[in-house]
């Protein structure tokens, strides 16, 4: 099966086990026909659980001194990774006319994200819980829907903005889990963080590639798109080392940290 057709099937899978089985098939596909885009409507399948709610309707911060509290936090991270599987697949199957490396990159990311999800799910199961036991929000996918019309905008606002926030958020979560005695979860997050640097770097690469194609300044365009789409401005403290490794320049991080937004036009 060609890679993009397999990716479309994985995206459409509407059960957890079905999604993971489709990803396993995807790992066996060759890249020789990667540019043969799938036909038909692009569909994202979702399992019945976890229940999706608005962010404001989620419970307050978990109590890290309880197994249930730590499980709720790990579940939230697992949901991010599950969503990231679909995001990477959608990046690959939705946008046409890009170099073969683009498709290979995002399919590889989807496979990585599935591995991350499985690590977190196994840890949840080891403490008596499973993915689906807590409600979640779908803000990541909502941004994917808003940017489905344009690959440059997608690369800016999903990998380079929202997923890059994980680089900042993960070390404090690792620290909390370690202090609470869940060293295994912290070790899993270390694996994920190392891979996510590469994933954000892939998004940064293709964002800059598309900016160059359109003669756009990547840093100014990034700030403009954040404002145009009313996306959350990057909040500190930033993981500077990880963001530099992922392709951000120090000067850009300084501007973002200062909250310097583009001037409004009248």
Image (cartoon, rainbow, N blue to C red):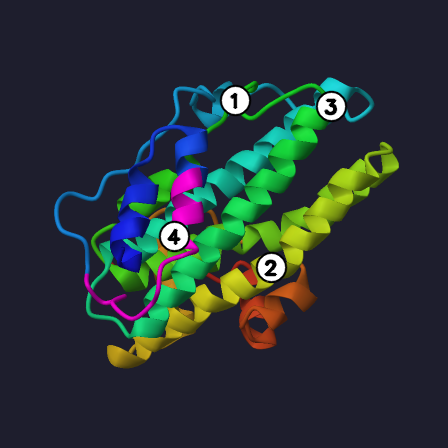
Q: Residue at x 42, y 46 (%)?
A: 23
Whether residue 2 sits left or right of residue 132 in the image: it is left
Q: Does the magenta stretch include residue 216?
A: no
Quickly name the residue at label 1: 132
Q: Locate residue 174, reporting x and y percent.
A: 76, 44
Q: For the residues carrying marks 4 and 3, which lies nearer the camera in this image?
A: 4
The label number, if any, that marks residue 127 in the structure image: 3
Q: Start and end of the magenta stretch? A: 21-36
Instruction: Identify the element where label 4 is drawn.
Output: helix
Residue at position x 18%, y 53% in the image: 38
Q: Does the magenta stretch include residue 33?
A: yes
Residue 225 visible in image: yes
* Residue 253 in the image: above or below residue 17: below
Q: Residue 26 — which label? A: 4
Marks 4 and 1 sit apart, C-alpha to C-alpha, by: 24 Å
Q: Regarding mark 2 in the picture, which secondary structure is present there?
A: helix
- According to the image, label 2 marks what residue? 195
């Amino acid at each position: 099966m060609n890679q993009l057709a397999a990716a479309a099937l994985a995206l459409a899978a509407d059960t957890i086990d079905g999604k993971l089985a489709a990803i396993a098939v995807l790992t066996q596909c060759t890249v020789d026909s990667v540019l043969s885009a799938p036909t038909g409507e692009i569909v994202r399948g979702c399992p019945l659980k976890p229940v999706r709610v608005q962010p404001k309707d989620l419970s307050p911060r978990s109590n890290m001194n309880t197994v249930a509290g730590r499980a709720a936090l790990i579940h939230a991270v697992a949901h991010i990774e599950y969503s990231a599987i679909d995001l990477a697949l959608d990046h690959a199957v939705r946008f046409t006319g890009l170099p073969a490396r683009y498709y290979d990159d995002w399919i590889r990311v989807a496979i990585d994200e599935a591995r991350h999800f499985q690590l977190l799910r196994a840890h949840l199961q080891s403490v008596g819980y499973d993915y689906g036991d807590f409600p979640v929000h779908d803000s990541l996918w909502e941004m994917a829907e808003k940017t489905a019309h344009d690959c440059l905008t997608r690369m800016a606002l999903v990998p380079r903005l929202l997923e890059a926030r994980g680089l900042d958020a993960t070390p404090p979560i690792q620290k909390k889990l370690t202090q609470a005695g869940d060293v295994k979860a912290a070790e899993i997050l270390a694996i994920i963080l190392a891979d996510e640097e590469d994933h954000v770097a892939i998004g940064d690469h293709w964002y800059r590639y598309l900016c160059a194609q359109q003669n756009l300044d990547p840093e100014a365009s990034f700030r403009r798109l954040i404002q145009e789409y009313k996306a959350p401005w990057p909040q500190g403290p930033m993981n500077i080392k990880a963001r530099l490794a992922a392709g951000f320049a120090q000067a850009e991080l300084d501007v973002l940290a200062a909250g310097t937004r583009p001037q409004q036009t009248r």
